[in-house]
C-alpha cells in the first residue's frame, strides 16, 4: 500500500487486504495504528495498491521492514504516480488507486475502506502469496 502525503511518498506491506464490494468497487486494508503510514493515509485521503508478483518477494519484505526508509525505497524502485499522486510499483500483478471512503477503528488497527478509482491487471504474472509468516507462490486446491 502506497501514498503521497503532501509530497512525502511512502508505503508499507500489509497482511490484511481484500475486496469488499463489486458495486461500488471497494477494497479494505488494515493498518496498525502505531505506524507512520496510518496517519499519512488518513491525511492523503487516497492510497495505491500494488499486488506483488512471485518474483518480488524481497520488495515485499523491504516494505514490511519498519527500519527501512520507505521514501528512499520508493525512489530506488521503478514506479509510476497515479492521478491522485500515490506511487504504483512497476511489474506487479495488479495495481489500483483508491479513495478513502471510510475508516473504522478496530483494536490496534484501522480498517480503511477504499473505493477503486482505477486499476490494471497483468494476468501473465503470478501473484505473491503470504502464508505462515512466509512468502511464495499460490497453488489452487
Image (cartoon, grey):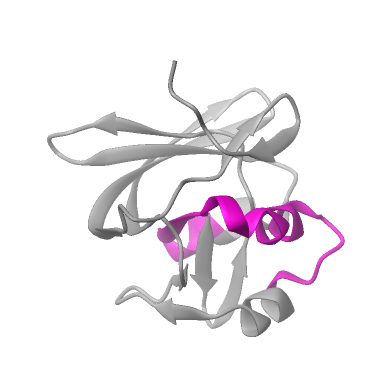
* Span colored in magenta: 41-70
State the residue at coordinates (62%, 34%): 130
Q: Nearer the viewer, residue 93 or 38?
A: 93
Farthest top residue in view: 141
Q: Nearer the viewer, residue 57 or 24?
A: 57
Q: Is residue 24 magenta?
A: no
Q: Nearer the viewer, residue 68 or 58?
A: 58
- The percent coordinates of residue 34 (x first, y second) are 75, 44
- The percent coordinates of residue 79 (x first, y second) are 49, 78
State the residue at coordinates (79%, 72%): 69
The quadrant where residue 110 appears = top right
Vertical relation: 27 (above or below) 48: above
The quadrant where residue 48 appears = bottom left
Vertical relation: 141 (above or below) 101: above
In-image side of 10 versus 85 (left or right): right
- Quadrant of image for the C terminus: top left
Q: Is residue 62 magenta?
A: yes
The quadrant where residue 113 appears = top left
- The percent coordinates of residue 92 (x first, y second) are 45, 61
- The percent coordinates of residue 78 (x first, y second) are 54, 80
Amino acid at each position: 500500500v502506497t501514498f503521497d502525503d503532501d509530497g512525502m511518498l511512502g508505503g508499507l506491506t500489509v497482511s490484511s487486504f481484500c475486496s469488499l464490494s463489486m458495486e461500488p468497487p471497494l477494497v479494505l486494508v488494515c493498518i496498525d495504528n502505531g505506524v507512520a503510514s496510518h496517519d499519512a493515509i488518513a491525511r492523503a485521503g487516497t492510497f495505491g495498491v500494488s499486488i506483488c508478483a512471485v518474483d518480488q518477494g524481497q520488495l515485499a519484505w523491504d516494505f514490511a521492514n519498519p527500519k527501512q526508509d520507505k521514501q528512499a525505497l520508493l525512489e530506488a524502485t521503478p514506479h509510476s504516480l497515479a492521478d491522485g499522486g500515490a506511487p504504483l510499483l512497476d511489474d506487479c500483478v495488479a495495481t489500483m488507486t483508491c479513495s478513502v471512503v471510510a475508516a473504522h477503528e478496530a483494536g490496534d488497527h484501522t480498517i480503511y475502506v477504499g473505493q477503486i478509482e482505477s486499476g490494471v491487471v497483468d494476468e501473465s504474472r503470478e501473484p505473491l502469496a503470504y502464508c505462515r509468516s512466509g512468502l511464495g507462490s499460490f497453488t489452487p486446491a
